[in-house]
Structures are given as structure tokens and as C-alpha cells.
Image (cartoon, helix red, strand yellow):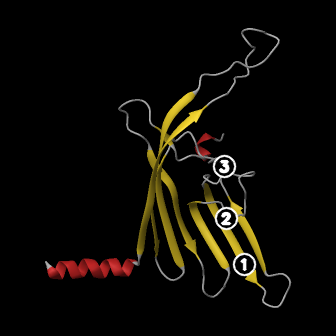
Amino acid sequence: VEDRLKKVETRVSEIGAIKFSGDIRLRSESIFGQQNILANGDNPALLGNELSPRHRMRLRARLQMRGSITDEFDWGLRFATGSFADNISTNQTLTDFFNRKPFGLDQAFITYKPKRVGGLRLQGGRFEPPWTFTEMTIDNDLMVDGFNESYTRAFKKSSLKELTFVAWQLPMLERSSAFVR
């Protein structure tokens, strides 16, 4: 048994360190004062009818694994709850009585940072957007698919402290030659 255990430990140490993390959140969410855009039932000249208040329980669960293949290659994998039709929320509404809730692939990527070219970073898979953004431009829960490249250069004796170039290829739709005439 000890020999088997040593073999397994040796194999795991060859793979590299794997870090596990995650979180779970349960919250109550109430929505009041919303209106639809239909003609008002009391006065058809007005738009909007008050909608019934909503009270719902929401759940978010995420499980994440990160690791290194070598000093130059990192990888990440994250699973999360949430409706498959909603690409910006990992919240799941607790409804539908006894039905199971979706738990799907939220991130899966490999990152390459070559030592010979300091500041260069190549990444492919499903990942967080590699460019700087705010909540006004892109929701912070949105994950993107594709490939990105970035190069960062720091300047020590300059008013310009750091310069970063980012390029990315994000396939929006797959084009299959089976459907082309």
C-alpha cells in the first residue's frame, strides 16, 4: 500500500500544484415597482401597467481549480450554477420545486507566458475578458471564448510607467462547411 501511495504522490507532484477554491451564496431578492410597456388598462393613452412584486431565492455556487503544467504554462477550470440561457449570471433561481439546477463549465483555459519573451502572455479557451473594462461596458460575470495575446512593458525612468497591448480573437458563431453550398 505504501509503494502505491508513493507512486500516486510522485505522479501528482509531476503534474504540479493544483489549487481548489470556490464559493456558495444564498440570498433573497425582492423586486418592486416595475412596469411593463403595454397600454395602461385604466387609461389607454398611457403606457405601463404595474407588475406584481417578485420575491425569489437565489443561489450561486462555483468550484474552481487552477494549476501549473510548467513554469510557463498555467491552466484554469471553473464550474458554476446558472441558467444556460443567461450568459452573464451564475445565479440560479430556486424554483420549479424538485427539479435539478444547471451546473456548467464557466471557465476552461490554458495560459502560456514564455520566459524568453518577458511580458508576453498567450491564452486560449473560455476565460475572463483580457482587456480593461467597467460595468458600464461589459458585465463582470461575462466569460468569453477564444484566444487572446497581450504584451506588457514596464518603464523605470519615464513618465510612462507601463504600456500594454492586447489582441483577441473571439469566435461569435461557428461556421461549418457542412451548411455551405
Q: Quadrant of the C terminus?
A: top right
Amino acid type at image mark 2: Pro
Residue 172 is tagged as 3
Q: Position of residue 19 (x, y in %)?
A: 43, 71
Q: Residue at x 68, y 81 (%)?
A: 119
Answer whether labels 3 and 2 touch (C-beta < 8 Å).
no
Q: Earlier in the sequence, mark 3 or mark 1?
A: 1
The residue at which mark 1 appears reads as 152
Q: Is residue 40 above or below residue 16?
A: above
Q: CA distance from mark 3 to mark 1?
A: 27 Å
Q: Residues within 10 Å of mark 3 (few under 14, many from 20)?
A: few
Answer whether labels 1 and 2 touch (C-beta < 8 Å).
no
Q: Nearer the viewer, residue 41 or 106?
A: 41
Looking at the rendering, which quadrant does residue 16 occupy? Answer: bottom left
- Give the secondary structure at mark 1: strand
- Give the secondary structure at mark 3: loop
- Give the secondary structure at mark 2: loop
Residue 130 is tagged as 2
